[in-house]
Image: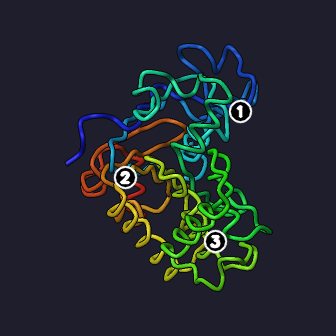
């Protein structure tokens, strides 16, 4: 079902908050979970590696503080990884580490090849600008200059995510949480990226609104074939959307496999706890 080529390849990605010390930086680090008591450094992501194939949805699950959102932050350049590498098939045929390219190249990758839907719409949208302007902003960053073309594209996408025609000129600050998430999705799709990151997109939404957002993601995947990395603490969301799932604890991947396999026959004790909590 999945193509042989890899849309995204991540190798040994690591991110820490703090300077580190010999106790936590050595070959056998001494940590309290992912925290160094000696120097206070938090090792948010530790040697994470995975692959994503075109059209695939990869879920990343774990409790708060497990490092799952930090992985997306590093890959979308919201944060700088301390070590590791990542390769995008659509950037120089996957031969160049996209974490080590120039700032100019990173901006182009972010604006043309990637999209991201944040848990907090305030991080992904300009709350006082119109919804049309929010979608157009990403197109401007990718080099678009035709106002009429950008407005037409924005209206097309906002309509696709069920923003009423009469509300497209409204600012997201006037929208409900579910509508804000839909505007974020429209913005993420604006330049037809091959890969979109979703970070806890249903957290804080009412159940009925969650269902609409999830149905929209399913529809977009079916129609566009875009690859997705979906971060969530909610296994029910991952069960619905993800082909494969990574389970993270204390910055590391502790289990990986097909989503059905992970949920029906978890092997790691931590995964077993997560699945038991769902049941």
Label 1's element?
strand
Question: Which dot marks residue 236?
Answer: none
Q: Tell which circle, 2 or 1, labels the residue nearer the N-terminal end.
A: 1
In which quarter of the view is residue 186 placed?
bottom right
**Mark 1, residue position:** 17
Residue 159 visible here: yes
Question: Which dot marks residue 57?
Answer: 2
The one of 196 and 14 positioned closer to us in this rendering:
196
Marks 2 and 3 in Cβ contact (< 8 Å): no
Q: Tell which circle, 1 or 3, labels the residue nearer the N-terminal end.
A: 1
- Whole-percent x and y of residue 99? 57, 27
Question: Residue drawn 47% across and 62% down?
Answer: 234
Label 2's element?
strand
Q: CA distance from mark 1 to mark 3?
A: 30 Å
Q: Determine crowd level at label 1: few under 14, some 14-19, many 20+ residues with C-alpha closer than 10 A.
A: few
Q: CA distance from mark 2 to mark 3?
A: 22 Å
Of discs 1 and 3, which sits in the foreground? Answer: 3
Q: Tell which circle, 2 or 3, labels the residue nearer the N-terminal end.
A: 2
Marks 1 and 3 in Cβ contact (< 8 Å): no
- Whole-percent x and y of residue 88? 44, 33
Question: Residue drawn 36% across and 49% down?
Answer: 245
Marks 2 and 1 in Cβ contact (< 8 Å): no
- Whole-percent x and y of residue 83? 58, 22
Q: State whether residue 57 is above or below residue 76.
A: below
Q: Determine crowd level at label 2: few under 14, some 14-19, many 20+ residues with C-alpha closer than 10 A.
A: many
Label 3's element?
helix
Residue 33 visible here: no
The one of 179 and 239 positioned closer to us in this rendering:
179
Q: Is residue 168 left or right of residue 226?
A: right
Task: Residue lying at the far left in this picture: please name it.
Answer: 1
Q: Determine crowd level at label 3: few under 14, some 14-19, many 20+ residues with C-alpha closer than 10 A.
A: many
**Mark 3, residue position:** 180
């Amino acid at each position: 079902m999945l193509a042989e080529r890899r849309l995204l390849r991540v190798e040994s990605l690591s991110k820490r908050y703090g300077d580190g010390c010999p106790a936590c930086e050595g070959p056998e680090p001494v940590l309290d979970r992912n925290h160094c008591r000696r120097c206070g450094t938090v090792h948010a992501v530790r040697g994470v590696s995975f692959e994503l194939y075109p059209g695939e949805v990869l879920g990343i699950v774990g409790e708060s503080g497990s490092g799952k959102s930090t992985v997306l932050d590093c890959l979308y350049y919201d944060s700088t990884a301390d070590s590791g590498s990542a390769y995008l098939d659509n950037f120089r045929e996957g031969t160049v580490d996209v974490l080590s390219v120039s700032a100019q190249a990173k901006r182009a990758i972010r604006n043309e090849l990637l999209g991201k839907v944040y848990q907090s719409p305030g991080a992904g949208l300009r709350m006082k600008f119109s919804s049309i302007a929010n979608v157009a902003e990403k197109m401007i960053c990718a080099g678009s200059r035709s106002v009429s073309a950008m407005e037409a594209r924005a209206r097309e996408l906002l309509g696709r995510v069920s923003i009423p025609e009469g509300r497209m000129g409204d600012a997201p600050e006037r929208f409900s949480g579910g509508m804000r998430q839909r505007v974020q999705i429209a913005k993420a799709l604006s330049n037809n990226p091959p890969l979109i990151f979703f970070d806890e997109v249903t957290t804080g939404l009412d159940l009925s609104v969650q269902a609409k957002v999830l149905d929209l993601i399913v529809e977009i995947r079916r129609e566009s074939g875009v690859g997705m990395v979906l971060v969530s603490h909610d296994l029910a969301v991952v069960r619905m959307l993800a082909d494969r799932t990574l389970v993270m604890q204390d910055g590391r991947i502790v289990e990986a496999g097909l989503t059905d396999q992970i949920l029906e026959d978890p092997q790691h004790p931590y995964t077993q706890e997560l699945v038991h909590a769902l049941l």
